[in-house]
Amino acid sequence: MPCSGNGSSLHEKGVFATTRWSVVLTAAGDGPKGAAEALAVLCESYWYPLYAFVRRSGHSPEDAQDLTQEFFARLIAKQWLHDVHPERGRFRSFLLVAMKHFLANEWDRARRLKRGGGQVPLSLDAGAAETRYAREPADPATPEQIFNRRWAFTLLEKVLDRLRREFTAIGKADVFAELEPALSGARLDYAEIAGRRNLNEGAVRVAVHRLRVRFRDLVRAEIAETVTNDAEIESELKHLFAALAQ
């Protein structure tokens, strides 16, 4: 998907007519198969943040797995999308409100479902999810804060993986491994890296700059898939940084 450094050209190029969330909203529950596929791709990045939300809300690991799977089963079947309208905005907000509604009104019935029965639209690794959840900071964070924090980290992990694959595809996986710490603010020894790679220090600085620019572009592109206009990209970026700072 096209992405620029300033966000305004996203709208000018018509990106929002074809983002995954826009496709889902346009279909609104009874549209083409492509809408279901777009929703499934979006949900792959959100199942763990929602699992963490359910766990922090007081449910056991087993119930959290059942509830998260059942939530996505119903969502991907588009049973809850008929009343969703494009002006409702970002996918993250929609998911959180939908999960709260689900837990408040339907968790009792969902928890009685036989585990593994029925449709399982996403592959939820319960063991890995609980291991990740056990690493959550022992702080008084609310379920919403946990969800937002996990959303932020999951999005960045997805972007890093994409960036790593880009470098690997051109035979520069080792370069990415060496420069990646700069993306998290680590100070690199440019002279040392230049010496190892038989480059001048300026070339290394340029490579780091380009890496950071590409990383920012990919973050914007990932967020753009989950909103309906470019103003919401800026809002989600601010929310992302706030979640990471919690």
Image (cartoon, helix red, strand yellow):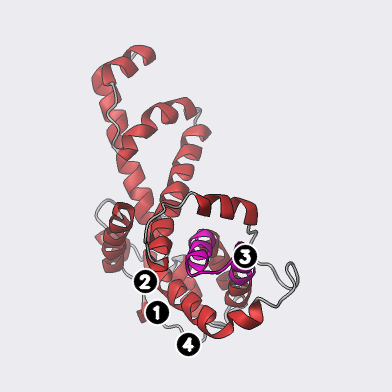
Q: Are the residues tagged 2 and 1 within 8 Å (C-beta)?
A: yes
Q: Is residue 23 magenta?
A: no
Q: Residues within 10 Å of mark 3 (few under 14, many from 20)?
A: many
Q: Report the mark closest to the observer, 4 or 2.
A: 4
Q: Residues within 10 Å of mark 1 (few under 14, many from 20)?
A: some
Residue 54 makes an appearance in the image: yes
Q: Report the mark closest to the observer, 4 or 1.
A: 4
Q: Which residue is mark 1?
A: 86
Query: Within the image, what quadrant is residue 30 found in?
Result: bottom right
The answer to whether 118 appears left or right of 72 in the picture is: right
Q: Which residue is mark 3?
A: 65
Q: Which residue is mark 4?
A: 83
Separation (CA) of disc 1 from disc 3:
30 Å
**Label at residue 71:** none
Q: Amino acid type of disc 1?
A: Pro
Task: Kindly identify the residue that appears in the image at 47 percent across and 38 percent down.
Answer: 164
The image shows residue 49 at horizontal and vertical percentages of 48, 61
**Label at residue 228:** 2
The quadrant of the image that shows the N terminus is bottom left
Separation (CA) of disc 4 from disc 2:
16 Å
Residues drawn in magenta: 45-69
Find numbered disc 2 in the image and state the secondary structure of the residue it sits on. loop
The answer to whether 180 appears left or right of 129 in the picture is: left
Q: Amino acid type of disc 2?
A: Thr
